[in-house]
Amino acid sequence: MLALFKVECLKLKGTKILWLSIIILALTIALEFYSYTGSTKYSIDRDGWNDYFMSVVILINFLTGYMSYYILTCYIYAREYQERTHMALFTSPVRRSRLYFSKLLVIYMYIAVSLLLAFGLSALLGMLITTRPLTFEIVIYQLGIFAKMILMHAMLIPIITFIAIRWRKFVPAIMGMCTVMCLNFVLVNTPGNTFYPWTVPLLFSPHGTLGRTFTNVPGGVISICFIFVLGLLLALRSYIRIETK
């Protein structure tokens, strides 16, 4: 498995899609930094560090996280068909389930590293525009938030891998990304919003005035666990049974 993981990392290294995914998240940090430096409406000195980080968290959980992760996911799982190398891959003696999980592990590593770097970069840029100290308690609290984000975004990936495997094209990434973002806008303030799994990362993190006052935590846990298990089963079934022609 480790050897397959290294191969997938090498295949992804330096690709335009990887850079696009990184740039999307980098622009998120840059946009929030610009908002705090270019407008008197936002101030770390006045509002505190937690509000500053919350603005970054909301944007990632609401829009840019899905853009970055889904583009990369569909690319990783559909690239063999796009490059017409799938026959060599699927006729190799390596079990397809191991191939699937090696690719999934690459995506999970990217999610974890990118979110931790987003936190670190946000903190460094924030210290340039305030004299308010970033205390150890705030750092630990925010790391807990970002750790939960890693877990929740990771649980939403398998269903996207199924879409990529099923349709074997990069286009589903764009369609899925647009659908998720549009439904987030529509459903985030509705009753039962947590039963739509893609609102869960937003609603289970600090989200300001977005969403309803009451968050149905059990409903959110059930919905995101259900979509994780369903996506994993569908993706594995499709990947194992996929034809080589």
Image: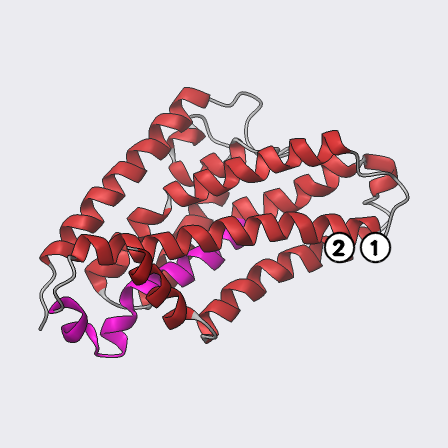
Quick check: 51 above or below 181?
Answer: above
Residue 32, percent from left and from top: 71, 53
Tell which of 152 and 31 is nearer to you.
152
Task: Give, as a three-letter code, the residue at label 1.
Answer: Thr
Residue matched to label 2: 33
Quick check: 211 above or below 120?
Answer: above
Residue matched to label 1: 37
Give the magenta range: 63-91
Quick check: 244 above or below 132?
Answer: below
Task: Give, as a three-letter code, the residue at label 2.
Answer: Phe
Residue farthest to the front?
3
Residue 195 part of the magenta-drawn span: no
Position of the N terminus, as image quadrant, is bottom left
Q: Residue at position x 23%, y 66% from top?
A: 168
Tell which of 182 and 50 is nearer to you.
50
Residue 164, percent from left and from top: 27, 60
SS of the residue under disc 2: helix
Residue 136, percent from left and from top: 75, 33
Position of the C terminus, as image quadrant, is bottom left
Q: Residue at position x 41%, y 44% from top?
A: 154
Q: Residue at position x 60%, y 43% from top?
A: 58
Tell me if 49 is positioned left or right of 120 in this view: right
Decide: marks 2, 1 in contact (CB < 8 A)? yes
Q: Is residue 116 visible?
A: yes
User: How many residues crowd mark 2 within 10 Å: few (<14), some (14–19), many (20+)?
Assistant: many
